[in-house]
């Protein structure tokens, strides 16, 4: 989809307006009443998917802040010519930016009047923006963005995706380092672990469950119990506080509890869980619609209870020792669960937990404790972590980049990069900020340079 440099139009188009707005060439505009509107945040560029910019923030002449969408046109009348006045997708537009007003009143489909303002960017500036080849950006935001570059230079694409994965890791590390300033390591690790076991649809619920139990004292009490009692005690408390008791036969099957053990779980809850009977979560908060049995929250709670009861207060030590010894952490997590009494932890989920929880936790703790060896071994584990299957957002980002072409050797580091790519760039259509798009534009301009010199 490369655009030859000599095929660009000679005059600026609306794409140039959007680039000028996105680049912050104006921080203040004047509305049709002669009043100044300050641009606090220009919004996220949608690249033609609805209003030009979403979630912008402006300061009105009376000092009020407003958040909403921004639409740009050369002529104010293009609002109606493009049928925006009948499209409810434009009902959140709070500012119509134009270069020519001609007395036009901008009205939304819901009847609201949109303030119209003149773009305070000179024709000379717009021409300069256009001359930097904005038409290249027209190829982004569609079905596939980087097919040619993915085919000719897969290593370049892979390197960008890996850097995005590293950025996702760094963000998690920073969040955990921040948590260490106010809570001990265990109290920072467990919310992240519960969150990971909640999958996409029950993360908040799992974090609510974690927050309602006193984990420091609870894990210490487990250390004093015989091995045969630890799992049932913790499972009873977690299911009880989670609002799952008394268990239905279907839920007991999900937790691999035969009838006699199901009765024991409910008895233990009545005997040892009385301190938390007032803290029980409503059973209705759990999202169980069309959830596969292995991903049902009862099954996830049972698996996590088995993992925590296996280590008790030694959980952090066990995980960090595995990293220091260069052991495969996903295999360790799986081996720590007695599958005769609890649902297994799948290999792919173990990989995802290692990537999203264990490794960032280890790096954050290593930095706080000034342990460079642990940090180095955690990064070695990050680079070597095998790939879990791609989640839907990662598959969507990969298809956006390369279509049906494979991008090999991404490993889990690359999978995490694809997740960030979809969330940060592809989903909100922030193509002008996307590193993949920047690489494609740079590659296209470089390949067009010899051809353009022929016309000089």
Image (tube, rainbow, N blue to C red):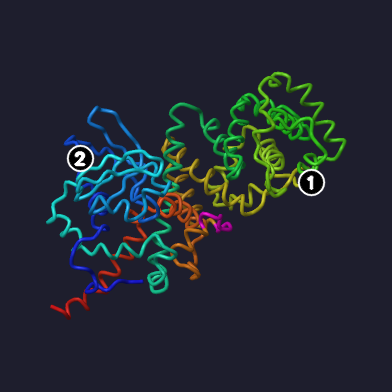
Question: Percent x, y for residue 338?
Answer: 74, 45
Instruction: Examine the rendered structure and indicate whether residue 14 appears above or below residue 64.
Output: below
Q: Earlier in the sequence, mark 2 or mark 1?
A: 2
The stretch of residues the image draws in magenta is 386-394
**Is residue 50 shown in magenta?**
no
- Vertical placement of 451 versus 392: above or below? below
Report the front residue among 74 and 379. Answer: 74
Q: Secondary structure at mark 2?
A: loop
| Left-right relation of 132 to 201 | left
Q: Quadrant of the C terminus?
A: bottom left
Q: Is residue 218 left or right of residue 192?
A: right
Q: CA distance from mark 2 to mark 1?
A: 73 Å
Q: Is residue 195 left or right of residue 91?
A: right
Q: Main secondary structure of the magenta part?
A: loop
Is there CB contact under 8 Å for labels 2 and 1? no
- Residue 340 got which mark? 1
Q: Which one is in front, 291 or 36? A: 36
- Kindly identify the residue that appears in the image at 60 percent across and 43 percent down: 201
- What percent of the width, then of the height, locates residue 72? 28, 50
Q: How many marks?
A: 2
Residue at the spot 59% in from the left edge and 28% down from the top edge: 211
Crowd around label 1: few <14 · some 14–19 · many ≥20 (10 Å): few
Residue at far bottom of view: 454
Q: Nearer the viewer, residue 106 or 261?
A: 106
Task: Give whichever of 193, 143 is nearer the camera.
Answer: 143
Query: SS at mark 1?
Result: loop
Which of the 4 quarters of the picture holds residue 57?
top left
Place of residue 138 in the rendered image (x, y in percent of width and height, measured from the top left): 32, 63
Q: What's the mark number on residue 32?
A: 2
Mark 2 crowd level (few <14, some 14–19, many ≥20, 10 Å Cα):
some
* Quadrant of the drawing holding the N terminus: bottom left
């Amino acid at each position: 989809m490369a655009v030859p440099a000599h095929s660009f139009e000679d005059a600026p188009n609306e794409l140039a307006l959007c680039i000028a707005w996105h680049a912050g060439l104006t921080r203040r505009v004047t509305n049709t009443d002669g009043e100044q509107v300050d641009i606090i945040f220009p919004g996220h560029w949608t690249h033609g998917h609805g209003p030009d910019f979403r979630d912008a923030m402006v300061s009105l002449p009376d000092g009020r802040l407003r958040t909403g969408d921004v639409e740009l046109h050369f002529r104010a009348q293009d609002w109606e010519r493009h049928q925006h006045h009948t499209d409810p997708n434009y009902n959140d537009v709070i500012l119509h930016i134009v270069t020519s007003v001609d007395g036009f009143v901008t009205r939304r489909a819901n009847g609201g009047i949109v303030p119209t303002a003149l773009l305070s960017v000179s024709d000379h500036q717009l021409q300069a923006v256009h001359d930097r080849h904005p038409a290249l950006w027209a190829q982004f935001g569609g079905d596939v963005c980087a097919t040619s570059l993915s085919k000719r230079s897969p290593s370049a694409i892979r390197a960008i995706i890996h850097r995005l994965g590293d950025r996702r890791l760094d963000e998690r590390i920073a969040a955990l380092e921040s948590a260490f300033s106010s809570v001990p390591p265990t109290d920072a690790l467990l919310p992240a672990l519960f969150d990971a076991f909640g999958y996409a649809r029950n993360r908040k619920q799992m974090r609510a469950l974690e927050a309602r139990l006193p984990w420091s004292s609870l894990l210490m009490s487990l250390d004093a119990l015989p091995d045969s009692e630890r799992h049932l005690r913790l499972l009873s408390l977690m299911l009880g506080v989670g609002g799952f008791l008394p268990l239905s036969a279907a839920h007991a099957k999900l937790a691999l509890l035969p009838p006699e053990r199901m009765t024991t779980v409910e008895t233990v809850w009545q005997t040892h869980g009385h301190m938390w009977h007032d803290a029980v979560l409503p059973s209705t908060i759990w999202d169980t619609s069309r959830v596969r049995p292995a991903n049902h929250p009862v099954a996830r709670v049972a698996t996590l209870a088995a993992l925590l009861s296996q280590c008790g207060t030694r959980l952090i030590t066990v995980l960090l020792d595995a990293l220091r010894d260069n052991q495969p952490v996903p295999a360790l997590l799986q081996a720590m669960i007695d599958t005769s009494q609890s649902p297994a932890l799948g290999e792919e989920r173990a990989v995802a937990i290692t990537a999203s929880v264990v490794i960032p936790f280890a790096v954050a703790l290593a930095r706080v404790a000034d342990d460079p060896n642990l940090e180095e071994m955690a990064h070695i584990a990050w680079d070597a972590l095998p790939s879990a299957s791609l989640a839907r957002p990662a598959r969507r980002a990969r298809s956006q980049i390369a279509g049906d072409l494979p991008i090999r050797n991404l490993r889990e580091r690359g999978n995490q990069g694809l997740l960030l790519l979809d969330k940060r760039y592809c989903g909100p259509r922030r193509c002008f900020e996307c590193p993949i798009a920047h690489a494609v534009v740079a590659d296209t301009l470089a390949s067009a340079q010899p051809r353009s010199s022929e016309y000089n």
